[in-house]
Amino acid sequence: EPSPRQRHTRSAPASYHSPIPPPHLSSSEQVVPQDDSFRGCQKHLDHLLMQGFPSGLARAVAENSQIFQHRLWIVDNSGSMQIEDGSLIEYNKANKFVKVHRVSRWEEIQDTVQYHASMAVSLDSPTTFKLLNDPGVDIGPQQFSVAMNHTHTSEEELRTVRDTMTNTNPSGVTPLTRHIWEIQQKITDQAPELRREGKKNRYSHCY
């Protein structure tokens, strides 16, 4: 069950375990136009509407989940993530604002990654998270994925995400440039196939 704590990032759009409370609409008002190209996304759309997403945003998110073949997150676990200038916004079960919690940057990132991993599983969106620094073999993998090839159950994938993010202690430098070059090379290699299939990849940097 998602935590009621919700967060704002400092330099990226906010992410939430439960979305910002939308306007109260009756079921008859939550109307989303249907067409043949979108019927395959219906279960994703239904899930998003149940989460409280407005219908237009729910449709956009569900459609994009089909367009982007793969999502890659670079997650900053360097020493600067220990700075206590982060925040988590708490809502109650009725989605009413309660308070803002002062937390570290790393706690913000932990919440963000776990939310987006859960969302990726719900939308069947292949997603990879890669930590800037190797957390150590006793902690967990530097790179982990969800909704990729179904060799593991969703529960196992999310457990790996949760345990790795929970047990990782941010430290070290910020080797961002090397990771960006690696991603650029990977996308360049995949570009012809992506163009043929009308697909895209998405890169996000979480810091």
Image (cartoon, rainbow, N blue to C red):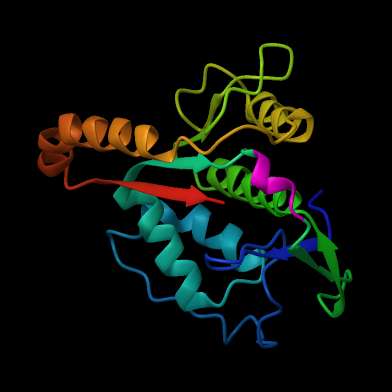
Total numbered circles? 0
Answer above or below: position of 146 versus 28: above
**Image location (x, y in percent) of residue 7:** 71, 64
Answer above or below: position of 20 versus 78: below
Q: Is residue 207 left or right of residue 107?
A: left
Q: Examine the structure image and report whether residue 81 is included in the region drawn in magenta.
A: yes
Nearer to me, 91 or 32? 91
Q: Examine the structure image and report whether residue 206 is included in the region drawn in magenta.
A: no
Residue sitting at x 31%, y 30%: 182
Nearer to me, 11 or 163? 11
Nearer to me, 161 or 207? 207
Q: Is residue 53 left or right of residue 189?
A: right
**Image location (x, y in percent) of residue 28:** 59, 85
Residue sitting at x 71%, y 51%: 111
Q: Image quarter for residue 193?
A: top left
Q: Furthest residue to the top?
A: 137
Residue sitting at x 68%, y 75%: 20
Q: Which residues are magenta?
A: 79-83
Q: Furthest residue to the front?
A: 173
**Image location (x, y in percent) of residue 83:** 74, 53
Q: Image quarter for residue 163?
A: top right
**Image location (x, y in percent) of residue 186:** 25, 30
Answer above or below: position of 100 versus 141: below
Question: Majority secondary structure of the magenta segment?
Answer: helix
Residue sitting at x 33%, y 48%: 68
